[in-house]
Amino acid sequence: MEYVNPLTGFRVDGRRPNEMRQLKGEVGVVSRADGSALFEMGNTRVIAAVYGPREIQNRSQQQNRKEALVRCEYRMAEFSTGDRRRKPKGDRRSTEISLVIRQTMEASILTHLMPHSQIDIFVQVLQADGGKCTIFEYFRFL
């Protein structure tokens, strides 16, 4: 499959071979979240919401916690890609991306200032068009 049309020199989406996808971001898109953002890279749209810090919901995890517990859940909406096959919850790729986001956020949050609390991060891909991996590579270097 040709990514660049040899006659026009453009990619299928109209970009030149050396041109990056357009990146946009908007904060405060989920009113009930403590923090939220919508990221767009090309035709890929990802929404993230953060809740907390708040008291730990699971009492067994609360004992002797000297730092905040950071939890992350990443999902792709079933309608986000062209193929409509349903992906099982907790597939390997989603678990890996959740772990990368959680580790990145744990390193940047001052969890020691919030003992006995938890922070929940939810990330959902609304529309995927090849820029998804690039957005999550961003989390690795945050």
Image (cartoon, rainbow, N blue to C red):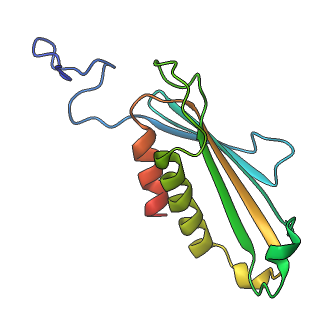
In the rendered image of this protein, does residue 40 appear above or below residue 93?
A: above
Q: Specify whether 27 is left or right of 105.
A: right
In the rendered image of this protein, does residue 41 appear above or below residue 7?
A: below
Q: Which image quarter: residue 65?
A: bottom right
Rendered location of residue 99, percent (x, y): 54, 60
Q: Specify whether 84 is left or right of 66.
A: left
Q: Specify whether 112 is left or right of 134.
A: right
Rendered location of residue 86, percent (x, y): 56, 26
Q: Which image quarter: residue 141?
A: bottom left
Give the mark count: 0
Rendered location of residue 27, percent (x, y): 69, 45
In the rendered image of this protein, does residue 91 appear above or below residue 40?
A: below
Residue at screen point 11% across, 11% down: 7
Name the residue nearer the viewer: 55 or 85. Answer: 85
Q: Quadrant of the N terminus?
A: top left
Residue at screen point 18% across, 22% down: 4
Q: Outermost residue, left direction? A: 6
Residue at screen point 52% across, 44% down: 91
Residue at screen point 53% across, 38% down: 24
Rendered location of residue 8, percent (x, y): 16, 13
Q: Outermost residue, top direction? A: 7
